Each structure stands twice: as structure tokens, then as C-alpha cells.
Image (tube, coloured by chain):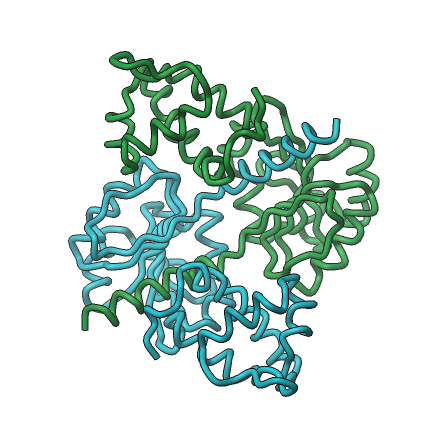
Chain colours: A cyan, B green
Amino acid sequence: MEEKEISKAVISRLPRYFRYLGELKEEGVEKISSQELSNRMKVTASQIRQDLNNFGGFGQQGYGYNVSYLYEEIGNILGLNRKHSMVLIGAGNLGGALAGYENFKNLGFDMKAVFDIDSKKIGKDIKGIPIMHTDRMSSFIKENRIDIAVIAIPKTAAVGIVDELLSCGIKAIWNYSHVDFDVPEDVIVENVHLSESLMRLSYNINRYDQEHK
Amino acid sequence: MEEKEISKAVISRLPRYFRYLGELKEEGVEKISSQELSNRMKVTASQIRQDLNNFGGFGQQGYGYNVSYLYEEIGNILGLNRKHSMVLIGAGNLGGALAGYENFKNLGFDMKAVFDIDSKKIGKDIKGIPIMHTDRMSSFIKENRIDIAVIAIPKTAAVGIVDELLSCGIKAIWNYSHVDFDVPEDVIVENVHLSESLMRLSYNINRYDQEHK
């Protein structure tokens, strides 16, 4: 399948389809119509048909979509048909939450080590994942051919860490620090700026209040 | 200022402008040209001029933008000129990280209490914020006129909690559970689905690999 044919807008909706299809699979549902999926996902049935038509010849009239097949196809496009190895930088509260997330593991993301500079934490573990000193980060990444670095440290420390990550060949960063990194074009960064999400919430509260006062 | 005049696309970029302007303020910068801001933010200067023109007559040719004024104006539009009170449901790792975030407090979001059902946690606190039994949640929310509920519990528990939150008048939910809630139109939900962010990263890694193999 040529992935370039699928529009960016459709791609941005795939993780949500993947989540719903995963739930249907868990429930033992084998087939679902666009109308049933529409009711669940609060998206119009016609949007669903348009989106899923990108994936070719399933979803026949009067039959519905094959849940397992669609789940697997969308998983492939999202790159979930391979394992990814990760390291986490920052064993604070947020790092602890990220390292311990069963759901990431279930999606094939394997956290191999956590790095921190706090001597009280080094030598311990988070759900079996060892916490090591940041001094050991570069050699660990090279030896274990790590794919993804997850950054959960304050922004003042984050920029220096990213330079080090780039120099040992990291090509993908999942960034929870409140800073945008300046990286080469072949490095992929996905930012999770929680404060910005909170501001969007605040904006919507404010707008609602303005419109209804 | 009429907020409806500003497009959705501009609004979605405001939190990022706000973050950069806040950093400039901290650094003591009083004025900045669109070109300088462009260099920092990796956005074209013309995009910046277009976006910030929405906020009226500052940013004169050869003068630049007044950092404090723009920071405050954008803050007002984002609803950050008022305080918001929050409660958190779920004192796990993620909850601990969210409750302890100084940055949210600095933006005017005041976490008043954390609710959990784990008897080992109840009566303790997270950075001074008391952890109470979920039994007390409804009365606490009503008595303290809480604005925002932050949900950081497994999805199996989350749906029941949301019903309870709605019945005690909560109108804004910041949701970290992997489930979409079915809420009335006057309730605002901002979802943070971390797995979906990880899938976007994975998709981009996969696409890059496909294009460069």
C-alpha cells in the first residue's frame, strides 16, 4: 500500500480509529458497520467511510468492516508492526508515570532504561526498568540501538541532553519538556506540551463564558 | 476586543506565542521584531505578522512588538486573566506529576484537592494538596465551586466518575484517561491521549524509514 496517498488529515485521525478498533477487538466484535462505528466514535458515518476507504477493499455494503483486519492495517501504517526501544530521561513524577505505562508496552514500545542525575534514584528501578546515571546514557543508547528518547526533565537541562542524544544517533524524541528543540531534518520530534493543552481548555471555558453571559 | 474575529488556526497557535513571550519577559526583553521572533520560534516572520495583527495596533514598522503588552493580551484571550480552581481524580504516578506541576499554578490554575480510593494515600498530600477519598468529591466540588476536574484514572473507572462530576456541576474536564466522554454541549473536554501522541511519533518514524530505505 502506498502510504503517500493518504492525506494528513486522515493520518491524524488514525490513532483514534486504532484505539476504538482495539476496544472492539477486546470485546470480541468481528464486524462493524460504519453506522455503528459512527455512534461509538461520534463521527459521521460518511466521514468514517471516506477515511476507511483509503485502506481498500473492505467494508462492503451490508457487511461492515472486518475489525481485526482494519486494526492490523491501521497499526501497520502507524508503524506499530515493529517494536520500538526507548529510554527515558528524567525519573521524576512524570517520568515515573511514563515509564510505568502498560499501554505503551502493549503497543510495542519497550522502555529499556531511565536516566537521572539524582544519586538517591540511581540503582533503583521503575517497574523493573533500571534507573542509571545520565553519564551512562550515550554508551547505553549506542550499545542497545535505542530508537526513541523520551524527555521529561526541566527545560533548562533539556537542551544540553538533546545535543548529547543527537550526537549518539537518536532520531526520534518524545518531548515533555516545555521547550522546542532545534534538530536536524532527519530527527523526528513529537512534543507534548501539557501547559498548552491546559491553555486550550482555559480558552474554551473563557469563550463559552463570553458567549453565554 | 471581539474574540470571534480571530480564526481557529490563529487561536491554536496562541499558547505557543504565549510561552515564547513569557520567556522573553523573563529575559527582560521589552520589544521584539517579527524577524527576531521568527528566528526563535521557527515560524516565518510573515506568519507572525499576520497572526499578531489580529491583536490590533502594536508592532509598528521599525519598532517591533511590545512584549509585555502582547503577553497580557494573548493571556486575556486564553482566559488566563482569571484564576481557575481544579481538582484531580487519581493520585497515581501521572496524578502526582500533574498535581505537583509548578507551571500550572503559575498560569493561575489552583489545584485544591486530589481524590482517590486507595486508603494508603488518603489523608496524605501531594506538595501540600490534600488527598481525600472519592466519596467526598461531590460535596467538595460544590462547596469550593471548582471549575475544572482533571481525570487521571484508568478508563474503566473514568466513565462513572464523569457522570458524578457532571451531576455536581463540573463544566470543564481535562482528561488523561484513554476514553472519550459523552458529555452535554455545555461541558468542555480537553483530551490528552498520550498513546495517540506516541502513535504519531511512530507513524513519522515509519514514514521516514519508508522514504529513505
Tell me where residue A186 sits by quadrant.
bottom left
**Quadrant hosting residue A171:** bottom left
Residue B77: percent from left, percent from top = 55, 26
Q: Vertically, is B205 above or below B109?
A: below
Q: Where is residue B23 in the image (x, y as percent from the top left)?
A: 36, 26
Quarter of the picture holding the N terminus of chain A: bottom left
Left or right, residue B78 beside residue A86: right
- For this rendering, which residue is in front, A46 or A2? A46
- Answer left or right for A125 relative to B116: left
User: What residue is shown at x 58% (from left), y 51% (from top)?
Assistant: B191
Closer to the camera, B203 or A166? B203
Count of numbered marks: 0
Question: Is residue A122 something that shows in the picture?
Answer: no
- x 32%, y 46%: residue: A117
The residue positioned 64% from the left and 50% from the top of the image is B151
Residue B128, compared with residue A186, is above or below; it is above
Q: Tell me the residue at 65%/35% (across/down).
A: A205
Residue A142 lies, in percent from the top left, at 19, 64
Residue furthest to the left in view is A167
In the rendered image of this protein, does residue B45 appear above or below residue A51? above
Can residue A163 be seen at all in this image of the molecule? yes
Where residue B65 appears, as percent x and y from the top left, is: 34, 17
Location of the C terminus of chain A by quadrant is top right
In the depicted view, which residue is nearer to us: B86 or B124?
Answer: B86
Give whichever of B70, B54 is nearer the camera.
B54
